[in-house]
Amino acid sequence: FGSSSQSGAPNPFLIRTMADSGAAEIINRGLDPLAKDPKATEDFSKAAEEVIEKAEKLVQGGRIDEAVEEMLAVEKKSRMASDGISTSKLICAVVTMFYNGKDMAKVNEYIPLLTKKRSQLKRAIVDLIQLAMGWLVKEDDKSKKLELITTLMSVTDGKIFVEVEGARLTKILAESKEADGDVDAACSLMQEVQVETFGTMDKMEKTKYILEQMRLCLAKKDFVRTQIISKKINPKLISAADMQDLKLGYYKYLVQYYLHEGDYMAASNCFQRILDTPKVKETAELWQDAMKMLVLYTALAKRTNEQVDLINRINLFEDYAKLLEQLPVFKAFVTMFVTEELIRWPLPMEAELKADKAVTEAMGLYLRDEEENRWNTLHKRVIGYNLYVIQQYYTEIRMSRLGTLLGLSVDEAEKEVSELVTDSTLGIKPFTARMDRPQGIVSFSKVNLENVMNTWVSDVTNILQMVDQVSYHVQKEIMVQGSNKKR
């Protein structure tokens, strides 16, 4: 061991200041009374000061073992008297002495040894863990750093009063695993920590931790767990002014999840929340990209009540309309989907759209597989919109003419009509059509929903009556058979 007073080496006994000033705040962070230390029965502060000064001289003389024995003897008395301040000073001084001597093996040996002593005070454990965690930042040797992390995690395991420190250590270890390329191991480590149950962790840190869990799950492509973890964050909580960056990060991860699921409507809703963020509103580049994404993903979503309502609000709602005025290409794009006129394909502004960096990113962002092509999806949405428009003006139309209006072959037009009839159950106006293939005619019949419902209710009533009659006859037959057996 070198002398603790060497140039550049921290004084091992300066830990007394930290123990005096920080421990009380750490141990009284709103913990349950069961996690607090009993009241001290005797004050060992003077004895602790004296033995630490004596130990410092012994260390300078190279008498390490004797210094440790002296401090541990007083530590035992202080611990039995529940003097948290003095106990904390002593055990921190012991471990710091080994740390300054570059003996990490002793550090890793004494940390669990001191924290697991009988009736060890919680305040002392917290202080010691906090002290050792500060060394992790300074440690350049990766193997020594990982060994110290493992030691500290073994101490924090199962102790509620150091659950926050345990979570931080897990995060540091996960970062190390990820840096080594082992994303699966990093994700597994982070998933084990249920920070949403930690009453002592600051809401900002807790949110960051959950976002890190989401990020690792997405990196691992564990989309099911990503969705489960996302439910742990309250959207109202991250709407606070000091959490805008976390809000943007949260919705960024949700967009990635929804795009993988092919849920463009949910992705659009995320960009609505992003546009509502003051930081985005104040930055032209941010709101322009968010607005473009909102428009594109809304157009890519299937035609439902929600989709039709949103695209009309984008066109008419004052806040969105003002933003669209500054994006003429996207304003023209939205106008096509709210006007009952056929949309040509390729789109009139397709060249401008493909030249836009945000559009290129939106169309290629988080594709589910190599075969997915969002331009093809957009084409299908345009065809679907055109079919709704045609339905407004025709009761019957020849398939050849329909294909011409849609810019498709007869077979392709037939396929699109069939798919839209199947998928339009959630539409704002159900798309109904009957195809006469021999005649090559499509009939757009308008269904009276009230009549359909009345017919359904009548059919259900008839079925229930028939079931009642069958039940009656079965019971009657059972009674007849029973009476015959008695005879």
Image: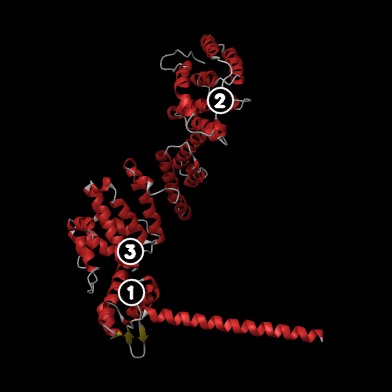
Query: Which numbered dot is residue 374?
Result: 3
Q: Which residue is mark 1?
A: 429
Query: Of label 1 and label 3, which has the lower sequence position?
Result: 3
Q: Amino acid at mark 1?
A: Lys
Reply above or below: 357 against 51.
below
Reply above or below: 485 against 79.
below
Q: Which residue is mark 2?
A: 105
Reply above or below: 91 against 296.
above
Residue at (45%, 44%) from the top-left corner?
181
Q: Amino acid at mark 3?
A: Arg
Do the residues under discs 1 and 3 have CB atoms within 8 angstroms? no
* Residue 206 seen: yes
Q: Position of residue 336 (x, y in %)?
A: 22, 68
Dot 2 lies on which element?
helix
Dot 1 lies on which element?
loop
Dot 3 lies on which element?
helix
How far apart are labels 2 and 1 at the CA level?
73 Å
Residue at (41%, 42%) from the top-left corner?
208
- Crowding around mark 3 (Cα neighbors within 10 Å: few <14, some 14 to 19, many 20+) is some
Query: Of label 2 and label 1, which has the lower sequence position?
Result: 2
Reply above or below: 246 against 344.
above
